[in-house]
Image (cartoon, rainbow, N blue to C red):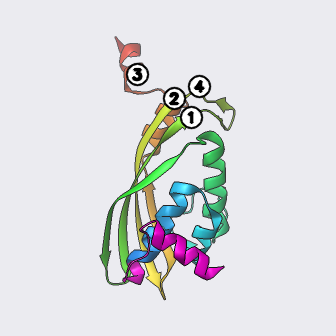
Amino acid sequence: MKALILASLLAAGVAHADPVTDAARTYAAFWNTGDPALARQALSPDFIDRTLPAGREQGVNGPLQASKGFRAAVPDLKAEATHIVPNGELVSVRLHFTGHFTGKFGEVQGKGQAIDFQAFDLYHVVDGRIAENWHLEDNLTLLQQMGVMPGPQSAASKTQ
């Protein structure tokens, strides 16, 4: 099974010679595909989310839960790692998320709105796997695109 995952990563252009960059690319591939096997490959069994959102489980199950929930709202979600910058055991990753909000997010039903937002992650990689993660997502843009929060045009029209 491990050889099959490695072969699929090589075929997808994910695996390289640097284990720090490999872990970041594998984790980005998880966000792009939603494949739990990729998250388990990239994350240490003792993985710690240092910016854990309220309600999300700590550890490997947290990102699995987040991906599953977000993919229910945005089934065609794509995540492109536009920048991967390694520095020793740390690696910075800029992710560009796109898709269409056609599912449900909480009580809000999507109407096909385009989703296009950025995220920034910093990973601490130990023994080729992500042991810690600090992340920032542009949730304001995401929530405005989903219609959960008013956007800049809505706010401007209310004051005029």
The residue wearing badge 3 is 155
Q: Which residue is mark 2?
A: 113
Which residue does the image show at 60% across and 62% down from the upper left?
A: 63
The answer to whether residue 4 of the structure is visible from this angle is yes
The amino acid type found where label 3 is placed reads Ala
Q: CA distance from mark 1 to mark 2?
A: 5 Å
How far from the left and from the top, in percent, is residue 151? Answer: 43, 27
Q: Is residue 41 magenta?
A: no
* Point 55% across, 31% down: residue: 148
Q: Residue furthest bottom?
A: 127
Q: Is the residue marked by circle 3 packed among few (<14), some (14-19), or many (20+) residues within 10 Å?
A: few
Query: For residue 106, what is the image quadrant?
Result: top right
State the extent of the magenta-drawn residues as a range.
Answer: 1-20
Q: CA distance from mark 1 to mark 4?
A: 6 Å
| Residue at the spot of label 1 | 101
Relative to 89, is 66 above or below?
Answer: above
Of circles 3 and 1, which is in front? 1
* Residue of label 4: 111
Marks 1,4: beta carbons within 8 A: yes
Query: Badge 4: few (under 14), some or many (20 or more) residues near its Cα, within 10 Å?
Result: few
Instruction: Specify the amino acid type for callout 4.
Output: Lys
